């Protein structure tokens, strides 16, 4: 699977019957550069908000972070729409699987080619050499 | 199958059930000289590869489903071997 960051969500009004009630995430796949910075960014944003706004309530911090993450696409890779039944939220890192295997969890044949397989808590990443862009 | 280098791991508590207990390893596909080729992927690791070791990653969903023992698993990428040397 690949790692990606959730930058948005989608709701459908007109859709095929298989997709009724389904949850969709707009995902920005992470490159080498962003992987090492991702966890650091998450921790920093939390700390900054707690200090600046003197907010004790985690729920309010979470809502403000939503505002930042909603418009922040962090690289120029193509966005992917991913089916989700784990409950991924804006700004989360998720592991998603692309291809025919994305339809494996369903009994009926579903026209899905990307599914969220894991909500990532922590990324440990230490590249040996940097990508040459 | 692709030649890759292990560059990290991930921890995920909320995930598909077929991933339970599996080590999830970030692999960077490389060419023969060790130069990066494409984006990093996450694969399950039954062999316990160490950091920066070269491994072979298979993208065959059927093999991975058999390895995790779950026919409804959406996983595709699996480390099938650790490389001793390349010529």
Image (cartoon, rainbow, N blue to C red):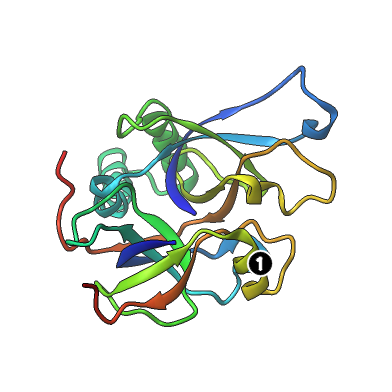
Residue where numbered disc 1 is placed: B65
In the displayed structure, A46 sits above or below A123; it is above
Query: Which chain hosts label 1?
Result: B
Q: Is residue B40 left or right of residue B85?
A: right
Rendered residue at 25%/40% (across/down): A52
**Quadrant location of the N terminus of chain B in the rendered image:** bottom left
Which residue is most to the top? A14
Q: Quadrant of the C terminus of chain B?
A: bottom left
Residue at position x 80%, y 25% in the image:
A16
Position of A116 relative to B54 (above/below):
above
Q: Quadrant of residue A98?
A: top right
Q: Position of residue B35 (x, y in %)?
A: 18, 55
| Crowdedness near tag 1: few (<14), some (14–19) or many (≥20) residues, C-alpha within 10 Å | many
Report whether residue A86 is seen.
Answer: no
Q: Quadrant of residue A99?
A: top right
Foreground of the two, A77 or B4: B4
Q: Position of residue A7 (x, y in %)?
A: 45, 33
Camera sees residue A95: yes
* SS assignment at label 1: helix
Residue A131 lies, with reference to residue A14, above or below; the image says: below
Above or below, comparing residue A113 to residue A56 in the picture:
above
């Amino acid at each position: 699977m690949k790692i990606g960051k959730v930058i948005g969500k989608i709701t459908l009004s007109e859709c095929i019957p298989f997709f009724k009630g389904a949850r969709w995430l707009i995902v920005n796949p992470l490159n080498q550069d962003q992987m090492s910075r991702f966890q650091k960014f998450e921790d920093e944003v939390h700390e900054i908000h707690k200090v600046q706004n003197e907010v004790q309530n985690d729920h309010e911090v979470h809502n403000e972070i939503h505002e930042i993450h909603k418009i922040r696409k962090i690289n120029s890779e193509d966005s992917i729409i991913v089916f989700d039944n784990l409950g991924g939220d804006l700004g989360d890192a998720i592991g998603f699987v692309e291809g025919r295997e994305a339809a494996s969890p369903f009994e009926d044949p579903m026209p899905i080619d990307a599914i969220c397989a894991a909500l990532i808590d922590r990324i440990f990443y230490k590249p040996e050499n940097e990508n040459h862009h | 199958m692709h030649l890759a280098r292990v560059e990290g791991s991930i921890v995920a508590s909320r995930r598909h059930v077929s991933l339970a207990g599996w080590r999830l390893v970030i692999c960077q596909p490389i060419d023969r000289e060790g130069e990066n080729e494409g984006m990093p992927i996450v694969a399950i690791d039954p062999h316990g590869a160490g950091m920066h070791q070269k491994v072979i990653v298979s993208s065959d969903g059927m093999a991975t489903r058999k390895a995790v023992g779950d026919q409804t698993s959406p996983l595709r990428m699996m480390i099938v071997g650790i490389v001793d040397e390349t010529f």
